[in-house]
Amino acid sequence: MENIFNTAILPPNEEQRLENLKKYKIFGTQSEVIFNQLAAVTATLLKVPVAMINFVDKDNVWTKADQKGESGKITARSMSLCSLAILNDHITVFEDAVKDPFLMVNPWLAGHLDLRFYAAAPITTSEGFNIGAVCIVDKTKRTFNSREQKKLEWIAAVVRAELEKRTDVE
């Protein structure tokens, strides 16, 4: 997939990952209180202005919830940092995004959104597929210590538990 990061953004298991994402029937759904609350708690807990729960399909990244209780925003996968976050089984962190040469080609970072800090924990299904990420963003650079990373991982685990409930009732 062509993208602005000048690196591969498709995991080796992309076909299976997309099939797994479909199983949860989450992409494109209506706003849900639990996900809105989780995004708001994440922003408060980690003291950031923006927190999102995003899911990554073939071509787009879809925001299920953000700290304001909004959902439905779609970003091209080729331009979204979440595309990078799902490649890792651990936290993805850019403490000062404007100083990272890897990200300087991203128009969102190069002044459009004035984004400086980004961190994301992958949302990993019980089958082991990273189908999305819980992301936090700030307009100022910052360090992201291990305690904060653990909190972000916990939120991603709660999102996963909520998703698993969807498959339990079928």
Image (cartoon, rainbow, N blue to C red):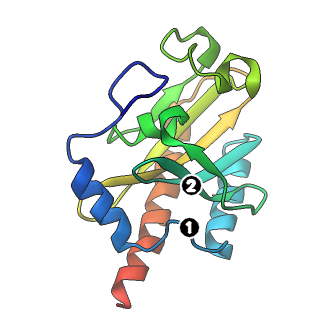
- Work out whether residue 19 can be spotted: yes
Count of labels shown? Answer: 2
Tag 1–tag 2 contact (CB < 8 Å) = yes
The label number, if any, that marks residue 28 in the structure image = 1
**Residue sitting nearer the eye, 127 or 157:** 127
- Compare marks 1 and 2 and give the one earlier in the sequence: 1
Q: Residue at x 38, y 75 (%)?
A: 164
Looking at the image, residue 44 sits to the left or right of residue 160; the answer is right
SS of the residue under disc 1 = loop
Q: Quadrant of the N terminus?
A: top left
- Give the x, y percent position of residue 78: 48, 34
Q: Residue at x 64, y 13 (%)?
A: 98
Q: In the figure, 12 relative to 156: above or below?
A: above
Q: In the figure, 35 relative to 108: above or below?
A: below
SS of the residue under disc 2 = strand
Which residue is under mark 2?
62
Question: Could you say which quadrant of the image residue 143 lies in?
Answer: top right
